Image (cartoon, rainbow, N blue to C red):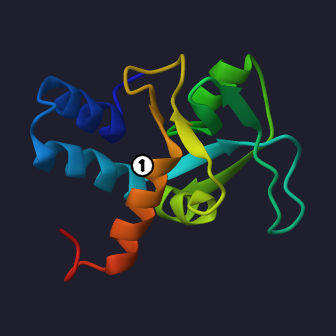
């Protein structure tokens, strides 16, 4: 599978962790991209029930930037919802949940703790003229 824009932005960010512009670029790609959220069961209308994974660092939903990556992680077809990163951060920001992105299936695999999700939503909510 070829590299995705999220893979590329993640690689640049990891190569220069002190570079805030590259970190913001990664989060911009995440917010603007379509993500495939792993669900417990098929969505019922607009209601989704994300599969939640507990770790020593917190609770996470799993999202992937390609449907094929979700299928590879789940080892077969699995229920999912296609959602923008922006919408996902809004959905999770007050749920004390982080995002496990592309876990086990891509070079961009990463855990974004709930604090990072809250920060992303707060940054996106400020709008372009007020974001720093």
Q: Is residue 90 left or right of residue 43?
A: left
Badge count: 1
Quadrant of residue 26 within the rendered picture: top left
Q: Is residue 96 left or right of residue 13?
A: right
Above or below 83: residue 104: above
Direction front: furthest residue: 56
Above or below 90: residue 51: above
Where does the image place residue 119, in percent across and percent down from the top left? 39, 58
Q: Nearer the viewer, residue 115 or 27?
A: 115
Which residue lies at the image location 13% right of the left edge and 46% below the top edge? 20
Mark 1 falls on what kind of element?
helix
Q: Is residue 79 left or right of residue 53?
A: right
Q: Nearer the viewer, residue 113 or 42?
A: 113
Q: Which residue is mark 1?
A: 116
Where does the image place residue 15, in percent across and percent down from the top left? 15, 24
Q: Which quadrant is home to the N terminus?
A: top left
Where does the image place residue 131, in percent across and percent down from the top left? 23, 73
Which residue lies at the image location 18% right of the left edge and 68% below the top edge? 132
Which residue lies at the image location 21% right of the left edge and 80% below the top edge? 130
Label 1: how many residues lie within 10 Å, few (<14), some (14-19) or many (20+)?
A: some
Where does the image place residue 93, in percent across and percent down from the top left? 56, 61
Above or below 104: residue 28: below
Which residue lies at the image location 63% right of the left edge and 38% below the top edge? 60
Q: Nearer the viewer, residue 65 or 58?
A: 58
């Amino acid at each position: 599978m070829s590299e995705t824009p999220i893979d590329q932005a993640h690689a640049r960010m990891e190569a220069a962790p002190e570079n805030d512009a590259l970190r913001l670029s990664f989060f911009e790609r995440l917010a603007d991209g379509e993500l495939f959220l792993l669900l417990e069961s098929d969505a019922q209308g607009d209601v989704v029930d994300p599969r939640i994974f507990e770790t020593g660092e917190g609770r996470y939903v799993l999202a992937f930037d390609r449907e094929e990556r979700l299928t590879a992680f789940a080892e077969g077809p699995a229920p999912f919802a296609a959602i923008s990163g922006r919408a996902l951060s809004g959905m999770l920001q007050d749920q004390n949940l982080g995002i496990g992105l592309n876990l086990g299936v891509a070079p961009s695999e990463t855990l974004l703790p709930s604090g990072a999700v809250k920060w992303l939503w707060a940054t996106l909510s400020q709008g372009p003229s007020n974001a720093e």
